[in-house]
Image: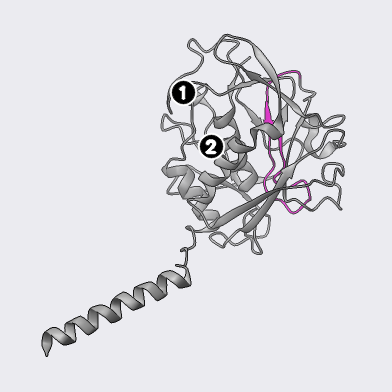
């Protein structure tokens, strides 16, 4: 059943910080800064390298994520074979390519990077010793019985910061079509959630973005309500990019390798030599 909603709060209190010029929202850290990765909670500072990994089966949940991680972690998601042809239980680890693609989209527009997957300790969610990897991605059977299908708190300082959890009892798929296409006409269907759209959205929460201050028809990735509900949304738009750059700044320039500099210097020297000969 389609229900592309997510739980960000789940018993954790956060203040939202709306930007006056854009619709994006972030989370107030209570001390004048924002919740984000990196060594500083000052907006616009680099997020550094964020490690990630998969939560292994049997990992204990906790009250930290409310009804999103009761019991112990599972490993499978129900993935649609193709539209209308049934589902197959797929290991979350088999979706690594889609996860890394979503991370690449956020990292391409902000001063952050990702590295992983690292082997997870298997310690309970938000266990003080479970500090590595930074973002733990896993599957639990949500206790809500419906509603949210994904959960991701912002980087709030606990070891549960940024963990991304999918509901084992919900259904997912890789919907055909392009951004903006509605994948369940009529608003009521057994069509599954578009995994790539949901993942990109939850990752935005894990990096520190909240839902926008106002819902409209522009449909940034971080917007889930109104006319945007049930649409394919796999491309960051101007508001998403403004939000992530507000948190982390623009991507750091990539330095050219030394060999490129040497080659460039050699070409410049050759050009200058030829110019001198022409002038002689």
> First in sequence: mark 1 or mark 2?
2
State how far apart marks 1 and 2 are (Cα): 13 Å
Magenta residue span: 145-165
* Coordinates of residue 65 in the picture (x, y in percent): 78, 36
Helix, strand or loop at mark 1: helix
Residue 227 is marked as 1
Q: Badge 2 is on which residue?
A: 222
Task: Please tell me which residue is depicted at 49% across the width and 35% down the height of the picture.
Answer: 214
Determine whether the residue tagged by mark 2 lies in a helix, strand or loop.
loop
**Front residue of this view, candidates 202 and 26:** 202
Quarter of the C terminus within the rendering:
bottom left
- Residue 47 left/right relative to 57: left
* For the residues bearing labels 1 and 2, Cβ distance under 8 angstroms: no
Classify mark 1: residues with Cα within 10 Å, few (<14), some (14-19) or many (20+). some
Q: Residue at x 71, y 35 (%)?
A: 93
Magenta stretch, main secondary structure class: loop
Q: Quadrant of residue 152?
A: top right
Residue 169, compared with residue 92, is above or below; it is: above
Is 154 part of what is drawn in magenta?
Answer: yes
- Magenta stretch containing residue 208, yes or no? no
Q: Is residue 19 visible?
A: no
């Amino acid at each position: 059943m389609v229900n592309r909603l997510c739980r960000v709060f789940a018993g954790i209190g956060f203040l939202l910080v709306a930007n006056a010029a854009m619709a994006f929202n972030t989370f107030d850290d209570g001390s004048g800064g924002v919740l984000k990765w990196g060594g500083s909670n000052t907006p616009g500072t680099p997020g550094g390298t964020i490690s990630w990994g998969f939560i292994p089966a049997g990992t204990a949940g906790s009250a930290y994520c409310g009804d999103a991680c009761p019991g112990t972690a599972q490993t499978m998601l129900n993935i649609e074979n193709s539209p209308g042809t049934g589902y197959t239980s797929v290991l979350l680890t088999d979706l690594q390519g889609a996860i890394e693609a979503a991370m690449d989209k956020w990292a391409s527009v902000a001063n952050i990077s990702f590295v992983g997957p690292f082997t997870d300790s298997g310690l309970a969610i938000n266990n003080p010793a479970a500090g590595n990897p930074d973002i733990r991605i896993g599957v639990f059977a949500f206790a809500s019985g419906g509603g949210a299908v994904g959960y991701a708190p912002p980087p709030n300082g606990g070891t549960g910061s940024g963990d991304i959890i999918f509901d084992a009892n919900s259904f997912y798929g890789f919907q055909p079509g392009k951004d903006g296409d509605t994948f369940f006409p009529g608003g009521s269907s057994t069509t599954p959630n578009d995994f790539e759209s949901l993942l990109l959205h939850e990752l935005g929460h894990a990096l520190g973005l909240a839902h926008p201050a106002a819902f409209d028809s522009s449909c940034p990735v971080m917007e889930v309500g109104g006319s945007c509900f049930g649409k394919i949304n796999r491309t960051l738009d101007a508001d998403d990019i403004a939000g992530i750059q507000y948190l982390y700044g623009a991507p750091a320039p990539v330095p050219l390798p030394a060999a490129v500099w040497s080659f460039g210097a050699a070409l410049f020297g050759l050009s200058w030599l030829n110019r001198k000969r022409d002038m002689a």
